[in-house]
Image (spheres, grey):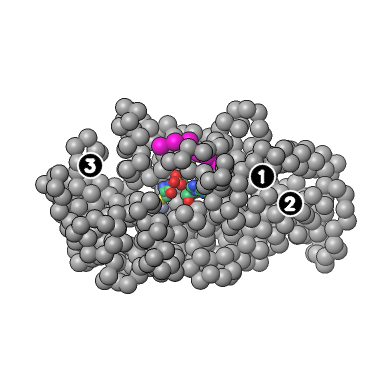
């Protein structure tokens, strides 16, 4: 599936210093050491395209973009992959409600998402694949789980065929990523697509692997499984494997995906006999009007609407940078005003010709330290105000162009 056009990007000569990133699984900040020497592989969970991109999504993809740029700055080749959940209950329900074909709904929302990502100068993923595109591998993976004795059937009243579930008890991988207790899991499982109470399941958290075809729902033929469609988590295992190979270095997404999605994606991979990701990076949740921004609540701020109303995408990026990616925060118009002023100030400073090795080095250091963008803004604020940066011992070849560095490291176009 076509993603979006890449922004101009000229990485700085590599620093050779590692990115230190918080890993949800270990609960610690640790250097990212790629599994393959010199080649870092990053997966970020993509959108469910039934509504336009909101600021919460943008914040998560901004964080993943910073990971991509930071890994490149250490000197690694970087490969990235992202899925599109185009076969899932909320999307199918919305398509039925609005009487549009689910494929058309998905395509139109993916196109809007791509426009927003391009405007925000997010680097496009190398692999951008939807569930419907990956169906062959998904069927193969679910079939392999059946063959490995990891899957079981749950009968249905409304259709002849049974659904298939993953038996989590066999590998003991539940909770490996989140580290949560079963009580914590139960609190969110149902609202995040799970069905803890379904009769016939062996374990409450066993995830749906394959749902037997229902009338008016899209379905695919799968010889051993029966006609149907996949459950949620298996898609990211298959798309990551195809785009990156397992195990890859970083699985990223918003913190709402820690459980069940990332926990259970990893459990699927383990059941397939494959380790999943080495580290897990999660972005905080963006709120608006007192609640987490979410499609189901409708309290959304849309990137495309802001842009249409004349807000510069780089000002939106500066609002995102003002919050550490791991913190939860709320969108506000006052912060947008601050960001617009910042953008003007930075651009004026860049026009005056901002060459300063120590400033560039301080920007790189803040990015390397768990993507500390508030610190990077403090560095840029001081630079734009003409303050003297600390003197650092830097080689004659150390990059000095501050605007070029802001662009390479943070995707900030100050021209
Ligand atoms: N398709 C699945 C992932 S496989 C999904 O979660 N889609 S989504 O459209 O609901 O979200 C897309 C991405 O944005 C996910 O990484 C999710 O964690 C993140 N996200 C969703 N809402 C917010 C929010 N309010 N703040 C920050 N990130 C968010
Ligand atoms: Zn995912």
Residue placed most toward the observer, 57 or 246: 57
- Residue depicted at x 52% and y 60%: 281
Using the image, determine if residue 50 lies above or below residue 309.
below
Secondary structure, magenta segment, majority class: loop
* Label 3 or label 2, whichever comes before in sequence order: 3
Q: Position of residue 108 (x, y in %)?
A: 42, 31
* Label 1 or label 2, whichever comes before in sequence order: 1
How crowded pointer 2 is (Cα within 10 Å; few <14, some 14-19, many 20+) is rated as some
Query: Residue at label 2?
Result: 377
Q: CA distance from mark 1 to mark 2?
A: 10 Å
- Residue depicted at x 44% and y 55%: 257
Q: CA distance from mark 1 to mark 3?
A: 42 Å
Per the rendering, the mark at residue 172 is none
* Label 1 or label 3, whichever comes before in sequence order: 3
Residue depth check, mark 1 versus mark 2: number of the one nearer the observer: 1
Using the image, determine if residue 63 lies above or below residue 351.
below
Q: Are marks 1 and 3 in contact (CB under 8 Å)?
A: no
- Residue depicted at x 39% and y 65%: 183
How crowded pointer 3 is (Cα within 10 Å; few <14, some 14-19, many 20+) is rated as some
Q: Are marks 3 and 2 in contact (CB under 8 Å)?
A: no
Q: Is mark 2 within 8 Å of ligand 1?
A: no
Q: Are marks 1 and 2 in contact (CB under 8 Å)?
A: no
Q: State which region is magenta.
A: 50-55
Residue placed most toward the observer, 93 or 360: 93
Query: Residue at label 1?
Result: 319
């Amino acid at each position: 599936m076509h993603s979006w056009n890449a922004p101009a990007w000229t990485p700085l000569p590599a620093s050779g210093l590692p990115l230190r990133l918080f890993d949800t699984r270990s609960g610690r900040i640790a250097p990212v050491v790629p599994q393959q020497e010199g080649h870092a592989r990053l997966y970020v969970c993509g959108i469910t395209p039934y509504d336009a991109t909101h600021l919460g999504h943008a914040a998560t993809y901004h964080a993943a973009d910073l990971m991509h740029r930071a890994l490149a700055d250490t000197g690694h080749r970087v490969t990235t992959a992202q899925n599109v959940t185009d076969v899932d209950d909320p999307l199918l329900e919305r398509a039925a409600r609005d009487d549009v074909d689910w494929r058309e709904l998905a395509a139109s929302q993916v196109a809007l998402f791509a426009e927003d990502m391009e405007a925000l100068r997010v680097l496009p993923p190398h692999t951008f694949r939807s569930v419907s595109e990956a169906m062959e591998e998904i069927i193969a993976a679910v079939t392999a789980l059946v063959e490995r004795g990891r899957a079981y059937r749950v009968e249905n009243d409304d259709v002849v065929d049974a659904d298939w579930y993953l038996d989590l008890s066999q590998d003991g991988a539940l909770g490996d990523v989140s580290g949560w207790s079963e009580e914590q899991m139960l609190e969110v499982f149902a609202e995040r697509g799970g069905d803890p109470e379904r009769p016939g399941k062996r374990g409450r958290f066993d995830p749906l692997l394959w749902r037997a075809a229902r009338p008016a729902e899209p379905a695919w033929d799968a010889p051993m499984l029966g006609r149907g469609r996949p459950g949620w988590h298996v898609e990211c295992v298959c798309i990551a494997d195809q785009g990156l190979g397992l195990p890859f270095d970083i699985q990223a997404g918003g913190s709402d995906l820690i459980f069940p999605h990332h926990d259970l994606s990893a459990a699927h991979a383990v059941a397939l006999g494959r380790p999943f990701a080495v580290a897990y990076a999660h972005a905080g949740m963006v709120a608006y009007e007192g609640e987490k921004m979410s499609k189901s609540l409708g309290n959304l701020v849309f990137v495309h609407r802001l842009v249409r109303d004349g807000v510069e995408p780089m000002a939106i990026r500066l609002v995102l940078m003002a919050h550490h990616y791991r913190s939860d925060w709320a969108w506000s118009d006052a912060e947008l005003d601050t960001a617009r002023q910042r953008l003007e100030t930075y651009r004026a400073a860049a026009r005056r010709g901002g060459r300063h090795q120590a400033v560039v080095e301080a920007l790189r250091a803040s990015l390397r330290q768990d993507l500390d963008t508030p610190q990077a803004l403090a560095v840029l604020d001081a630079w734009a105000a003409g303050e003297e940066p600390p003197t650092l011992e830097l080689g004659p070849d150390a990059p000095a162009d501050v605007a070029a560095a802001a662009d390479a490291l943070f995707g900030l176009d100050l021209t």
